């Protein structure tokens, strides 16, 4: 089959542009259905409705990026051939691009880490910008008057860089319009630039806001996140560690529920893992904890300060401390914080002041409020172990004709945004989610920086900051 060069589009004949055919092909590629990703990874648990497209979008984008580069390599060879001959044969055309196609094939085999940038009678740029100069980390470092390593640490928010230097680097990056090139980073380091975030649930405000904070913090470091919900299911936890952490991510921030430390280590493929709210006397992994004990103690002191003589604790009772590792669970640690506060205040609470719930749901808290009022138990305040519990408890009190805060002062824990919108607005112990996310990401990045260099640091446990926000529900 012979094609006269004149039969080709003018743009192709003179080699001035390959954007139109490449763009048309890319549009076709982008119409691939999202379920294709899950055919490639059949064991991957279905994402939640909140983050349903995250895994699929990121995997599909990598597939699209690879095919884009294949098309560019192919068209580059076509144009080189057209410019050097008046006519071309289909066989000759395919033969002339065999080198590019061979390279493309090897790249596909090692997707997504193969370096596609090459020289062959012209250059195929990773950023497809021809001869335009891509601003690099070295450019930023030179403009800021620092070393490349210092610029890299500053852009990642490393606390070891003094604020003045960090600001100078940030200003240089803004002026040069520098953005982190994840593809280039992946090619250089063998890393994907993706961090996994596995949370126990995403259909409640607090864990959803936590995962959003993690994604923002990752973006601040030029990274992306894959957010998954474990639903407190061991099968889901195992699948996420096997399919997401070990195959796609550089590391994972993980909220464990049913898997052991040994299982996490085996399933994660040696990738670094930072745990959330995993308090162990002999930690195996780095972890970041919510301020359960300190925050609960602050809540009890606040209720006493506003005049409560007999505050209740809604969420757990003494029995949780009798369970194996009960004192290391979130409910156990919040209960311990309450007991410590009562002890410091010289108060000996009765067992009936601690109310366990079947589930930490607003409906259970509302029912508990009904039962407490109906039983005639004397109380004038309540610390609820989550804001969701507090919202249901306040509604239950209203159902029985009690006013908040006049009859009962109520404070929650977590600091979800909805607290300020209720009537009355809800006092809360607010976990600083931005601080929690920053500490978790810092631990993970430190592990990535180790990368087998020297003796690993011992496991570290950090605690997020908090603040008590007094609103109408305790304002007397």
Image: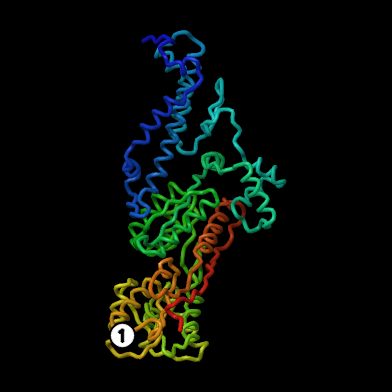
Which residue is labeled 1 in the image? 372
Picture quadrant where residue 138 is located: top right
Q: Residue at 39% across / 28% down in the picture?
A: 24
Q: Is residue 67 above or below residue 470?
A: above
Q: How many marks?
A: 1
x then y, percent, for residue 85: 49, 9
Q: Is residue 89 above or below residue 195?
A: above
Q: Is residue 320 above or below residue 19?
A: below
Q: Nearer the viewer, residue 48 or 330?
A: 48
Q: On the rendered image, what quadrant is the N terminus found in? A: top left
Q: Nearer the viewer, residue 402 or 254?
A: 402
Q: Nearer the viewer, residue 132 or 267?
A: 132
Q: On the rendered image, what quadrant is the C terminus found in? A: bottom left
x then y, percent, for residue 80: 51, 17
Picture quadrant where residue 413 is located: bottom left
Q: In the drawing, does residue 440 fall left or right of residue 44?
A: right
Q: Residue at 36% across / 53% down in the picture?
A: 239
x then y, percent, for residue 400: 28, 83
Give the structural element (helix, strand or loop) at label 1: helix
Q: Residue at 51% across / 69% down in the picture?
A: 282
Q: Is residue 422 above or below residue 307?
A: above
x then y, percent, for residue 384: 40, 77
Q: How is the image coloured?
A: rainbow
């Amino acid at each position: 089959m012979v094609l006269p060069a004149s039969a080709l589009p003018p743009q192709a004949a003179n080699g001035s542009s390959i954007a139109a055919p490449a763009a048309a092909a890319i549009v076709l590629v982008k119409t691939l259905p999202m379920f294709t990703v899950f055919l490639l990874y059949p064991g991957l648990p279905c994402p939640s409705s909140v983050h349903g497209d995250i895994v699929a979008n990121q995997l599909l984008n990598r597939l699209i990026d690879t095919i884009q580069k294949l098309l560019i390599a192919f068209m580059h060879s076509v144009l080189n051939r057209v410019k050097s001959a008046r006519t071309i044969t289909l066989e000759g055309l395919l033969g002339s691009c065999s080198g590019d196609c061979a390279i493309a094939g090897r790249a596909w085999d090692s997707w997504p880490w193969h370096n596609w940038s090459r020289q062959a009678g012209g250059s195929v740029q990773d950023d497809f910008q021809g001869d335009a100069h891509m601003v690099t980390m070295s450019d930023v470092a030179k403009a800021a008057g620092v070393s490349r390593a210092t610029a890299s640490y500053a852009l990642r928010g490393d606390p070891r860089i003094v604020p003045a230097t960090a600001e100078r680097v940030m200003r240089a990056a803004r002026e040069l319009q520098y953005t982190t090139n994840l593809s280039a980073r992946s090619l250089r380091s063998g890393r994907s630039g993706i961090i996994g975030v596995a949370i126990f649930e995403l259909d409640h405000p607090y864990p959803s806001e936590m995962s959003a904070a993690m994604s923002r913090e990752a973006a601040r470091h030029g990274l992306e996140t894959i957010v998954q919900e474990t639903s407190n299911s061991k099968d889901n936890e195992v699948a996420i560690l096997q399919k997401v952490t070990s195959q796609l991510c550089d590391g994972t921030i993980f909220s464990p529920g049913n898997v052991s430390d040994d299982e996490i280590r085996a399933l994660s493929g040696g990738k670094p893992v930072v745990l959330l709210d995993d308090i162990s006397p002999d930690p195996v992994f780095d972890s970041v904890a919510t301020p359960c004990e300190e925050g609960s103690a602050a809540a009890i002191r606040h209720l006493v300060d506003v005049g409560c003589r007999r505050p209740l604790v809604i969420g757990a009772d003494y029995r949780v401390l009798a369970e194996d590792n009960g004192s290391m669970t979130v409910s156990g640690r919040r209960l311990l914080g309450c007991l410590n506060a009562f002890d410091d205040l010289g108060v000996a609470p009765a067992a009936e002041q601690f109310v366990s719930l079947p589930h930490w749901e607003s409906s259970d808290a509302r029912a508990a409020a009904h039962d407490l009022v109906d039983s005639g138990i004397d109380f004038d305040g309540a610390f609820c172990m989550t804001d969701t519990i507090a919202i249901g408890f306040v509604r239950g009190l209203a159902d029985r004709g009690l006013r908040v805060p006049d009859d009962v002062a109520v404070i929650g824990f977590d600091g979800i945004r909805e607290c300020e919108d209720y009537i009355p607005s809800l006092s809360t112990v607010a976990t600083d989610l931005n601080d929690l996310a920053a500490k978790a990401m810092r631990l993970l990045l430190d592990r990535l920086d180790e990368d087998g260099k020297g003796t690993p640091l011992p496991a570290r446990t950090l605690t997020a900051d908090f603040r008590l926000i007094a609103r109408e529900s305790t304002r007397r």
